[in-house]
Structures are given as structure tokens and as C-alpha cells.
Image: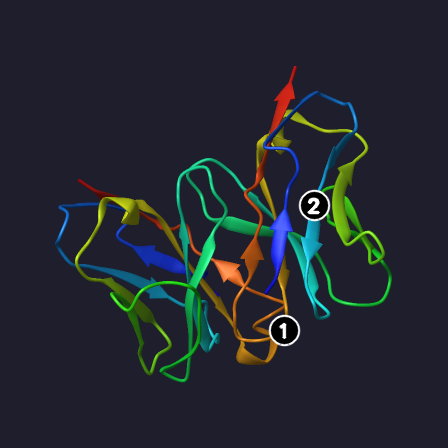
């Protein structure tokens, strides 16, 4: 059984650019959530996907968008990057039935916006 | 809306000494409570969780946390810490909806030899 994997591990982008981060869910998990963890802060919920539909969203602007694929893998897209988007982006997978009680996190993607 | 407060940003403690990391939450509904640990340059690992039933929950590596509804707290304790416990610890709540987990700002546990 493989765990949650994220790619790339590190990324440097220029302000105004667009970025795509990828996440492969743990085997059998059908729900994916994304979190942003700024330096020295706790993770903040961005959104959640179940059956390829967004079914929950935190307080993030529309330039943060996502996709979930039939194999339950997921992408996080951020348009018009700002310096404050620099953070560790974490993906978590779970079964929908226990999404609120059992989430497994990946190692994260460290995004630096310059 | 819910929020989590971790009162200490850093807790230094000597090896083999006891430690308590404090967590208070606010929510208008029933919640699930969690402690996650994050080692340097890694993701989050679930340490323990409270869903229902006994208010005292334990992890496999000696940590325990007690849910106190009247004080809206979920403090994490360990009777004797080891150097390998050095990490960032996050308290989190979930309100059982589709709004993900709400995390505190974290407590950096520093073990001194």
C-alpha cells in the first residue's frame, strides 16, 4: 500500500506566473484535501475534492483551483502567483466516509515565489 | 466557525522530563480533535485523535491527550520525553462537515539533553 505522494518537492516561481502541484492519493482513498502552510504557521484548508467535484472550500481566492481525476489523484493550480503564496502545500487523502476522522498527509511541495 | 489556540509557540524541556502542550478550541458544534506531529522537512503525521467515548486517548509512542469539554481543551502530555520527540506539534479540530481541519499555529517541542 503506497502512501500519499506529492510532486514536485520544491519549486521556485516568479510573481505573476502559474503553478500546478500534483498529489497521488493513498491506495483506495477517494477524497483529497489541500492545505497551505506558511512559514511558522499551521496548515490552512484550501479545498476538498470528492468524486472529481469540489465539495468544501476554505477562505482562498478563486485563483486557487483544483482537479481530481478518476484515479483520485489531484492537482492544485494557482494563477497569478503572489509573494505571499510562498508556502508548503500539503495534500491529504482519505475515504469520504471518514474524511473528518482519518486523513493521511503527503510530504508537501515547498513553493517559493520570487 | 471554529478556531484553535496553542498557547505556547515553543516548549523547551530536558530529556526524560514530563511535558504538556496546551490546546484550546472554540466551536459552536461538536468536534473531532487531533494532534499531528511534523518533523523537519516532512508532512504531518497523526499522533492521536478524539472522536467520542473515553476522554483520554493515547498514542503508541507514549503521548496522551485528554478532552475536556467544559474547558474546551485537548492538552497533549508525555511523562518522559526523548530526544527523538523534537518536532512541531499541531492541534486540530474538525466540525464533521466538508470544511477540512482547522489547525493551531503549532508548538515547537525542543528536547534538551
Q: Do the residues labelled 2 and 1 touch (CB within 8 Å)?
A: no
Residue B104, position as x, y percentages in the image: 58, 48
- A67 on left or right of B52: left
Task: Identify the residue at image location x=64%, y=42%.
Answer: B6
Q: Can residue B34 be seen in this view?
A: yes
Residue B112, position as x, y percentages in the image: 64, 17
Residue B44, position as x, y percentages in the image: 51, 49
Q: In this view, does B24 lie above or below B79?
A: below
Between the C-alphas of marks 2 and 1, the distance is: 19 Å
| Nearer the observer, B82 or A76 | A76
**Mark linked to residue B23:** 2
Along the polypeptide, which appears first: circle 2 or circle 1? 2
Task: Identify the residue at image location x=20%, y=53%.
Answer: A81
Q: Is mark 2 on a helix, strand or loop?
A: loop
Chain that bears disc 2: B
Q: Are marks 2 and 1 on the same chain?
A: yes
Dot 1 corresponds to which residue?
B96
In what quadrant of the picture does the C terminus of chain B appear?
top right
Chain that bears disc 1: B
Colour basis:
rainbow
In what quadrant of the picture does the N terminus of chain B appear?
bottom right
Residue A20, position as x, y percentages in the image: 22, 61
- A79 on left or right of A110: left
Q: Can residue B63 be seen in this view?
A: no
Q: Is residue A34 above or below residue B107?
A: below
Q: Is residue B79 above or below residue A13?
A: above
Task: Identify the residue at image location x=47%, y=42%.
Answer: A41
Instruction: Bin the neighbour count of mark 1 within 10 Å (Cα to Cα): few under 14, some 14-19, many 20 and up.
Output: some
| Nearer the observer, B95 or A72 | B95
Q: What element carries label 1?
A: loop
Amino acid at each position: 500500500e503506497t502512501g500519499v505522494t506529492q510532486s514536485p518537492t520544491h519549486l521556485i516561481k516568479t510573481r505573476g506566473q502559474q503553478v500546478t502541484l500534483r498529489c497521488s492519493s493513498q491506495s483506495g482513498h477517494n477524497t483529497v484535501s489541500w492545505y497551505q502552510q506558511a512559514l511558522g504557521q499551521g496548515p490552512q484548508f484550501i479545498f476538498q475534492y470528492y468524486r472529481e467535484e469540489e465539495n468544501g472550500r476554505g477562505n482562498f481566492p478563486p485563483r486557487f483551483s483544483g482537479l481530481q481525476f478518476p484515479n483520485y489523484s489531484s492537482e492544485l493550480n494557482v494563477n497569478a502567483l503572489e509573494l505571499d503564496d510562498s508556502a508548503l502545500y500539503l495534500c491529504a487523502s482519505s475515504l469520504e466516509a471518514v474524511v473528518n476522522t482519518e486523513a493521511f498527509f503527503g510530504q508537501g511541495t515547498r513553493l517559493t515565489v520570487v | 466557525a471554529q478556531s484553535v489556540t496553542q498557547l505556547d509557540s515553543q516548549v523547551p524541556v530536558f530529556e526524560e522530563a514530563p511535558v504538556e502542550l496546551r490546546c484550546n478550541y472554540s466551536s459552536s458544534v461538536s468536534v473531532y480533535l487531533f494532534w499531528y506531529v511534523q518533523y523537519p522537512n516532512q508532512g504531518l503525521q497523526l499522533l492521536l485523535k478524539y472522536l467520542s467515548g473515553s476522554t483520554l486517548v493515547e498514542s503508541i509512542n507514549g503521548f496522551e491527550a485528554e478532552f475536556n469539554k467544559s474547558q474546551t481543551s485537548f492538552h497533549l502530555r508525555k511523562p518522559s520525553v526523548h530526544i527523538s520527540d523534537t518536532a512541531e506539534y499541531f492541534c486540530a479540530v474538525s466540525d464533521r462537515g466538508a470544511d477540512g481541519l482547522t489547525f493551531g499555529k503549532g508548538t515547537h517541542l525542543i528536547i534538551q539533553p
